[in-house]
Each structure stands twice: as structure tokens, then as C-alpha cells.
Amino acid sequence: MIPLPNNAEIFPDADSVARAAADRLVALCAESRQERIAICLSGGSTPKRLYALLAGPDYVGALPWERLHWFFGDDRFVPWTDEASNVHMARTAFGDAPIPEGHLHGIPTDGTPESAASAYAETLRGFYGADDLDPARPLFDLVLLGLGEDGHTASLFPGKPAVDEREAWVVAVPEAGLTPFVPRVTLTFPALASARQLLVLVTGAGKREPLTRLAEGEDLPARHISSVGTLTWLLDRAAADLG
Ligand code: 6PG
């Protein structure tokens, strides 16, 4: 077993990690008295299982879809029709989920990564209703993040300037640190931290190395994941090296 992050919960497999995250979202929605509930989606492959679960018979009837707004923590700067797009991944995984028109807020992919970052920051500020993030009033009700094999999260890659951004909510990442090597647009750590709940979903043996490096104190980007609310790592046994 590898040394685990604080606030880590271990589950038998990737499906039970997804179910644990889905259960938390259902509970969050049930407790919320807000007219709108903002979820920040992670990209890559790990969350596909969760998004499909939410759209499936076990959960679709338990969620207030008309109140839910779905945002993205990052995306590859490719058309939403591109297989590498996180919007494409989420739309595919959500399938026939009853997401109302205008409730899936993808990161723009026209113009330049810089103009897309500015435009998405405006979208977030418009939804939030203020230019500064108040820790007492988080931007997101739930933020989902993943962990890359190099220790990145969202599109905040080791050695790239975006990791150190503390003012802008959204920035361009001209050079990704891991495949796909396309420009990215990513929320920054201050924006991602503006969460009532933040969940980091990590599954599979391929994540043992970054988890170990983090546990050994290496200053990888994922070390800077924080939340003004709660922060919980949901790991499966394979990632935690529990056989
Ligand atoms: C992305 C993601 C990225 C992802 C990690 C883990 O756009 O790729 O936002 O941060 O969460 O790379 O990806 P996997 O789930 O595919 O291992």
C-alpha cells in the first residue's frame, strides 16, 4: 500500500469510485437550496464511468437536472466534435441525460486559446455574479478533478506557468505536458479551489507512481489542489496498491 493523501477513501474498483462520487452528487443536490447547482467536470478517461452512471437508470431520476449546470475544469483546444475534446467525451458519456439546453458550458474552441480562456472566465464570472471569488460563497458546488501520471491535474502541468497563476480564473496552456500535445485551456488553482466539495478521482495501477511521488513530498501540480470547502480523494485499490 502506498502512503495516501489526507482525506483519501479507498474503494474496491473504478465502478465503486464512480458510484461514491455519484452518491455524493445526489446528496449535495438534495441538501442544496440553491436554484442553480454548479458542477465543474474533469476530463480524460476516468470520469467517463461517472458521467455514464449519472445518466443511467440508477441515478438519472435522483438528480435535479433542471437546476444543474455543468462546467469544465479544462479542455483541449480542439473542436467539440474532436475525439480529444472533453466536451465530446462528456456529451458522449452523458448520452441521453436530460441536460437542458444551455446547461452544459463548454470551453470555447474558436479564436485562440488565450481568447477562449478570457471568454470562459467571463462565462464563469457571469454565472457567479461577481469578479472576485468569495471563500464564503464558492463558485462551484462540486469540482471533480483527476490525476495525471505526471502529477498534473486539469491542464496544470509540471513546470508550466499556469500552475503558479493566482489571479486569473482561466488561462491558456500553449504546450501541454502530456498527450494529447495540443494547446489547452484550464481553470487555475484559485478557481478550482472555489468549491463546496472537491473530489479527486484516481483509479488504476498507473496512478500509483504520481500518488507515491506526491506522498514523498514532490512538488507536483496536484499537490496544490485545495478547496475552500471539503477535499476528498476517491481511490480504487489498484491505484492505492492494495492488490
Ligand atoms: C484532461 C483532464 C486531466 C485528467 C488527467 C487524468 O483534460 O486530460 O482534465 O487533468 O483528469 O490527465 O486523466 P485520466 O483520467 O485519463 O487518467
Image (cartoon, grey):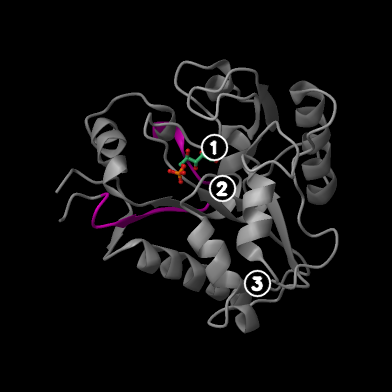
Q: What residue is shown at x 68% (from left), y 24% (from top)? A: 172
Q: What residue is shown at x 30% (from left), y 48% (from top)? A: 6
In the depicted view, which residue is nearer to us: 106 or 232? 106
Is residue 139 something that shows in the picture? no
Residue position marked by numbered label 3 in the rendering: 32
Highlighted range, magenta = 223-239
Measuring from the top left, give residue 14's x and y in whole percent: 36, 61
Q: Name the mark nearer the viewer: 1 or 3.
A: 1
N-terminal of the pair, mark 2 or mark 1, is 2
In the depicted view, which residue is nearer to us: 142 or 59? 59
Q: Does the CB distance between marks 2 and 1 fall below 8 Å?
A: yes
Residue position marked by numbered label 2 in the rendering: 42
- Report whether the residue tagged 2 is closer than 8 Å to ligand 1: yes
Residue 154, disc: 1
Secondary structure state at the residue bearing disc 1? loop
Label 2 neighbourhood size at 10 Å, few (<14), some (14-19), many (20+)? Answer: many
- Disc 3 marks a residue whose amino acid type is Ser
